[in-house]
Image: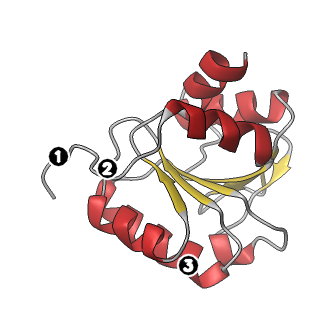
Amino acid sequence: MECEMPTVNSNPEELREYLETYKNIAIVGASPNPAKDSNMVTKYMIDTGYNVFPIYPKEDTILGQKVYRSLKDIPHKVDIVVVFRKPEAVAAVTDACIERGDVDLLWTQLGIVNNAAAEKAKEHNVKVVQSHCIKVEHARLLG
């Protein structure tokens, strides 16, 4: 997949509303490595009061949180799904969000854009934020 510019996205007012309203966050691609961005973002979101569900293929816990192998394994309501995976992986994550039926927002981190997946998410009433760091936006808008 070539690099894309987001054609589907949210504006700053919507970002603020999402961060104030939604509290349960699944992080796809969370890492146990403290040097990785996904670990730093996971820690920040925990430290600012969000319920975080890391999704990672290994480990039992990350930053004291139970690790899940997939989105479907999380037995709690998921408001936001944050994606730390390559753009081509976003389609499968989008399908998992739609299948769950309780995900309000699909959020891809900086540099991660998949407009086809974003359009599909919106068609199924899942809001979309692409190529924004949730930690940076939280600090900027609510910090």
Q: Which residue is mark 3?
A: 98
Judged left or right of residue 38, residue 48 is right
Q: Residue at left 61%, top 58%?
A: 56
Mark 2 or mark 1, which is nearer the start of the sequence? 1
Judged left or right of residue 10, residue 23 is right
Mark 3 or mark 1, which is nearer the start of the sequence? 1
Q: Which residue is mark 2?
A: 113
Q: Residue at left 12%, top 52%?
A: 2
Q: Amino acid at mark 1?
A: Cys
Judged left or right of residue 117, residue 60 is right
Q: Give the Cα separation between the discs numbered 1 and 3.
A: 24 Å
Mark 3 or mark 2, which is nearer the start of the sequence? 3
Residue 33 place in picture, x, y as percent: 60, 35
- Front-most of residues 30 and 26: 26
Q: Amino acid at mark 3?
A: Ile
Residue 67 seen anywhere in this rendered image of the structure = yes
Q: Given the current orientation, which residue lies at the most extreme bottom position?
A: 99
Does 13 appear above or below 81? above
Secondary structure state at the residue bearing disc 3:
helix
Q: Give the Cα separation between the discs numbered 2 and 3.
A: 18 Å
Q: Are marks 1 and 2 in contact (CB under 8 Å)?
A: yes
Dot 3, crowdedness within 10 Å: few (<14), some or many (≥20)?
some
Labelled disc at residue 75 = none
Q: Amino acid at mark 2?
A: Val
Q: Residue at left 73%, top 15%?
A: 143
The type of colouring in the image is secondary structure
Secondary structure state at the residue bearing disc 1:
loop
Q: Give the Cα separation between the discs numbered 1 and 2.
A: 8 Å
Residue 108 place in picture, x, y as percent: 46, 48
Q: Residue at left 39%, top 73%?
A: 120
Q: Which residue is mark 1?
A: 3
